[in-house]
Image: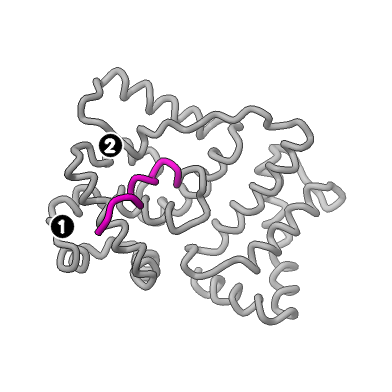
């Protein structure tokens, strides 16, 4: 996959590579368009032109710290198509994802938790606009690490002290881009480095590994809606 990512970087500076890469990915672009619109899309449809332009823009905007190129490009295509469909009067209703997925509270009872998880799951399965597209895209990233978006409901920190510790770990990684790249390449959280430089106990880092990785991926990627539910992390000073 890194070979593709490097090729995309080269395509930004070489038009011949750019044109060849786009041509080689025409089927992929059509597949993304069909998946987003829930119908067969051909090159005679307006959605093809929109998806094609979005893919081209994704190439120009891509950088290695955004993760793998294909999940990033799919998100860009989906957003452009969603804006188009929204302008056509489709996908008009947008459901907001419940922040519980990211931000738990130790005082909540089991019934409330179950309801909130069910709400978030419904969002991911419905045509709910940008938030749905972001969940789908980030889920592809999480899968590379061996977990899913809804695993966050059980591994998010509950106690305030633990939340602050996790936030400090996330901020430390975000402030060191090379660590983001290394994490994405190895698919491992750099626990030893964080423990040594931030002073967070290994036990906390091990227990909340998925949450920390998820927060880094969301805050360092193109997920503005999901990032809103993690804005408290940016407020925690190192």
Q: Secondary structure at mark 1?
A: loop
Residue 6 in the magenta stretch? The answer is no
Range shown magenta: 227-238
Task: Tell me where residue 110 appears, x and y as whole percent.
Answer: 25, 21
In this image, 1 relative to 24: left or right? left
Mark sitting on residue 200:
1
Does the magenta run of residues contain 236? yes
Above or below: residue 138 compared with residue 194: above
Measuring from the top left, give residue 82's x and y in whole percent.
Answer: 68, 42
178 versus 51 height, above or below: below
The label on residue 154 is 2
For the residues labelled 1 and 2, the Cα–Cα distance comes to 21 Å
> Which of the two discs, 1 and 2, sits closer to the camera?
1
Residue at the right extreme, as displayed: 44
Rendered view: 83 above or below 145: above
| Mark before the other along the chain sequence, 1 or 2 | 2
Query: Which residue occupies the foreground of this view, 231 or 86?
Result: 231
Q: Is the residue under label 2 in contact with that under label 1 (CB below 8 Å)? A: no
Image coords of residue 169 (percent x, y): 26, 57
Examine the image and state in which quarter residue 93 appears: top right
The image quadrant where one finds the C terminus is bottom left
Residue sitting at 68 percent across and 60 percent down?
Answer: 55
């Amino acid at each position: 996959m890194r070979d593709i990512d490097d090729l995309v970087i080269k395509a930004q500076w070489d038009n011949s590579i750019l044109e060849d890469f786009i041509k080689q990915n025409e089927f992929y672009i059509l597949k993304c368009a069909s998946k987003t619109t829930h119908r067969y899309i051909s090159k005679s449809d307006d959605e093809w032109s929109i998806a094609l332009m979005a893919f081209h823009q994704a190439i120009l905007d891509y950088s290695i710290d955004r993760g793998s190129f294909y999940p990033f490009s799919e998100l860009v295509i989906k957003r452009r198509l969603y804006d188009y469909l929204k302008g056509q009067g489709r996908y008009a209703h947008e459901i907001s994802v419940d922040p519980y997925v990211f931000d738990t509270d130790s005082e909540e009872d089991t019934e409330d938790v179950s309801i909130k998880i069910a709400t978030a799951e419904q969002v991911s399965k419905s045509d709910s606009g940008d938030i749905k597209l972001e969940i789908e895209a980030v889920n592809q990233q999480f899968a590379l690490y061996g977990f899913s978006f809804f695993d966050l409901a059980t591994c998010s920190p509950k106690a305030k002290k633990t939340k602050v510790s996790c936030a400090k770990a996330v901020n430390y990684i975000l402030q060191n881009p090379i660590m983001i790249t290394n994490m994405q390449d190895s698919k491992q959280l750099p626990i030893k480095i964080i423990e040594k430089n931030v002073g967070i106990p290994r036990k906390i880092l091990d227990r909340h590994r998925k949450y920390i990785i998820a927060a880094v991926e969301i805050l360092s990627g193109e997920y503005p809606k999901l990032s809103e539910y993690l804005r408290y992390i940016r407020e925690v000073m190192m």
